[in-house]
């Protein structure tokens, strides 16, 4: 019995030195080892010397322990966290352009239902921005299909460890 595709995905968050070539070394490591990257997001942190790399990996391509072990060997990697979905706060950004068609009110109502913001429009199209969990964006994308999606771009997941209640 095969696992659901989303159950094979796991989040690895790595703090790395904010230096040229670090991302290329990480990508090269994944390519050489045949590890499949589902999504990748990189940005500086509040410490100018560090960046956070959020990698969503497909565990069908390699065991998580192997991925972490290989990442840990890279000299510019400062710290690695494995984030289980229950231990992480995840978000993804989606930009989506749809046709207004003859039901612009329905387009707007559907977008608002998912917290969408209209960013741009012309006589026939509207571009929206959505920020939500990947699963919620999947639902949104599915519903927006009825209006005729003409362009779509998703960023991939970013994640941080879930904050714990101090009473625990």
Image (cartoon, rainbow, N blue to C red):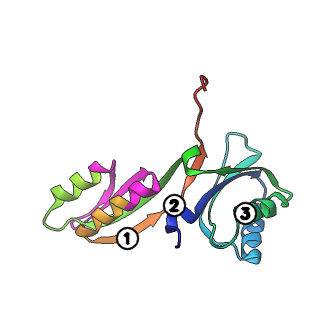
90 up-or-down from 139: above or below: above
Dot 2 alpha-carbon crowd within 10 angstroms: few under 14, some 14 to 19, many 20 or more? some
Q: Tell me how far mark 1 sits from mark 3, CA to CA.
A: 27 Å
32 up-or-down from 54: above or below: below
- Residue situated furthest top in the rendering: 167
Residue at the spot of label 3: 23
Quadrant in the picture for residue 10? bottom right
Q: Which residues are magenta?
A: 113-138
Q: Are marks 2 and 3 in contact (CB under 8 Å)?
A: no
**Which residue is more in the foreground, 72 or 146?**
72
Give the residue drawn at x 75%, y 59%: 68
Task: Say how many tags the image has.
Answer: 3
Dot 1 alpha-carbon crowd within 10 angstroms: few under 14, some 14 to 19, many 20 or more? few
Residue at the spot of label 1: 151
Helix, strand or loop at label 3? It is helix
Helix, strand or loop at label 2? It is loop
Tell me: 115 left or right of 123. right
Residue at the spot of label 2: 155
Task: Please name which of the two marks, 1 or 2, marks the residue nearer to the observer.
Answer: 2
């Amino acid at each position: 019995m095969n696992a659901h595709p989303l159950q094979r995905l796991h989040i690895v968050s790595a703090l790395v030195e904010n230096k040229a070539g670090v991302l290329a070394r990480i990508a090269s490591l994944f390519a050489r080892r045949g590890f499949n990257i589902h999504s990748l997001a990189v940005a500086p942190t509040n410490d100018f010397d560090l960046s956070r790399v959020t990698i969503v990996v497909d565990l069908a391509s390699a065991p998580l322990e192997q991925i972490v072990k290989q990442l840990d060997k890279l000299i510019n990697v400062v710290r690695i966290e494995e984030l289980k979905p229950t231990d992480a706060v995840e978000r993804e950004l989606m930009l989506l352009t749809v046709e207004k068609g003859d039901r612009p009110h329905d387009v707007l109502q559907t977008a608002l239902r998912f917290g969408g913001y209209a960013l741009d429009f012309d006589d026939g199209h509207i571009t929206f921005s959505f920020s939500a969990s990947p699963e919620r964006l999947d639902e949104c994308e599915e519903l927006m299909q009825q209006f005729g999606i003409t362009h779509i771009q998703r960023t991939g997941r970013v994640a941080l460890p879930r904050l714990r209640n101090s009473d625990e």
